Amino acid sequence: MAGVLLSEAEKTFILHGVQSDLRNDGRSKQDYRPMELELDIVTHANGSARVRLANTDILVGVKTEIDVPKPEKPDEGKIEFFVDCSANATPEFEGKGGEDLATEISNFLSTSFNSGLSFDLKSLCILKEIQCWKLYVDILILECGGNLFDAVSLAVKAALHNTMVPRVETMAMDGGNVDLQLSGDPYDCWRLDIKNVPCLVTLTKIGEHLIVDPTAEEENCSMASLVLAVTEDGRINSLSKTSVGSFHPHTLTEGLKVGTEVGIRLNKALKEALEKEEKRLQADKPERSGFLK
Amino acid sequence: MDCHAAMRGRGGGFSYSHAAVIGSRCGQPVGCRRAAASTAMELLSDQGLRLDGRRPDELRNIRCKIGVFSQADGSAYIEQGNTKVLATVYGPHQPRGQAKNKFLFDEALVNCQYSMAVFSTGERKRRPRGDRKSQEMSIHLRQALEAAIRTELYPRSQIDIYVEVLQADGGNYCACVNAATLALVDAGVGLREYAVACSASLANGEIPLVDVSHLEESTGGPNLTVAALPISGQVALMEMSQRFHCDHLPKVLERALEGCKDIHRILDEAVRKHVEETGRASGWGQVDRAGIVL
């Protein structure tokens, strides 16, 4: 990605490595790099998560607000994705420099969440046609070390898992007015169901091979990549082909198969990591290290 | 005579009360929240303690880390109480982007950008950067940091400093300057001395308070922000909101400068520790057999 300059020889070296299923950091084609996950590190948000995938650093905060449902979907809540490419990641993102990338990521996330099967927006409804919850999922990209889509989706899923939505009771209507009563206890909250929330899997084509979790250098060698949104039970919710190159239909079908397998594995790994992190947070005095680690 | 140095109010920007942090923002009219924050809360209790239990001359807990990211030339993270800031430095490098034609022949161009994560405040922000407040902050950051950087060492080049507020709880500017200083140290940019910022307020019309938190800011006391070069004691930037009697200014300023000196001590210790850790492999700070410090 940003600021990576590779010579022809270096690109060939990476290509040869991929061909013999031994990439330049020792991984095979379908291996991920090590990941770090931390939940609940922004106290001002209802839910937050930080994912560090090698050099890629993503911080996600989820905030809830009460809103009016859309007239065409009166019994559904809303979810909005906002991606902010911080200039901390690369000076190219200064000012409005990161907006193209930000729009691409946020649009893909909203298409994969709007399929209806991935996230139950009906659970966000408070009172049909009148009041619903709106989730603001704000993604902050702090460092880009390749494979942004996957890291972002992992962080989003983790942050949604961590989100506490306050419990609200609706009181009797008086002349069309609704009275919302919020519980006095700030810990009286409910959790979102993230079982079907997809993880994004990026398959990058280098030569004639598809690899997962490309580093910034590997992304530089590739012409095309395929992003799949895969759920826990292996369903593909949405798919998009990014960057300029092209795919042969045969590679594409093979990619779907590989992507699904990898996606199931990724979802499982995330689930385990979330459970572990949750256990740590429930301990007596969990240490909030955040960026201090 | 009153000091009419009153500038844009720093405290009034975000409105929420600490008692209602989790979720209870919804549904309530704005005025209601305002009222909660402006009820006669005393900045200083009878026992001489502040709202968060600190003494008037006590700083919030500072935790910092130097070298957070590997791709940037320098980076640092600082927590001052609940205010959390990340700073990265790129450069000195060849001028690029908008500054390509603006480079200076005799010194480095310092480029700062202040941005806030949209989830950093109680109320969600619409834009992370580009609004007036952020632009003003960027200019003030540049002012303070340019005073510390030895720009004459890097002619025809540019130094980018980007700060990102992850969580805002008062004294954002101060935390940003401190984080940026640490990041500059990490990047190895030549500095005259550290640029350190600290805020101060005045309680009960007479007692100066150091390192003002968001709650104290929004309770409505005056706020004096000072960026200083603490060794020489020079002031690089001073900003004041609201008015108080001129006679009080020296002691409030002194309290802020004292705060700067205290923060300087903490930052300096962190830098020394960091250098010791990272330089251990090459024997930095170790004593050889003859007793000579390497």
Image: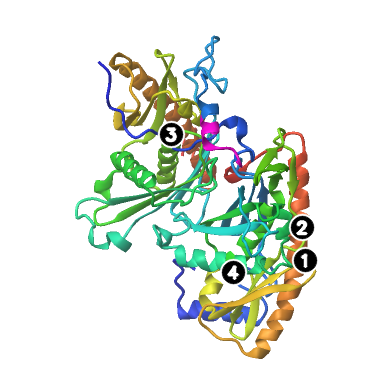
> Amino acid under label 4?
Phe
For disc 3, the marked residue is B12
Q: Is residue A269 magenta?
A: no
Of all residues, the one furthest to the right in this rendering is: A233
Cβ atoms under marks 2 and 4 closer than 8 Å: no
Query: Which secondary structure lies at badge 2?
Result: helix
Q: Is residue B26 above or below residue A134?
A: above
> Where is B152 relative to A95, above or below?
above
Q: Is residue A50 left or right of B266 when viewed as pictured?
A: right
> Which part of the image, by quadrant, shows the C terminus of chain A?
top right
Residue on which disc 2 sits? A271
Q: Mark 4 = which residue? A: A108
Measure how far apart labels 2 and 1 are at the Cα level: 9 Å
Q: Are marks 4 and 1 on the same chain?
A: yes
Q: How is the image coloured?
A: rainbow
**Quick one: A39 or A36, which is closer to the camera?**
A39
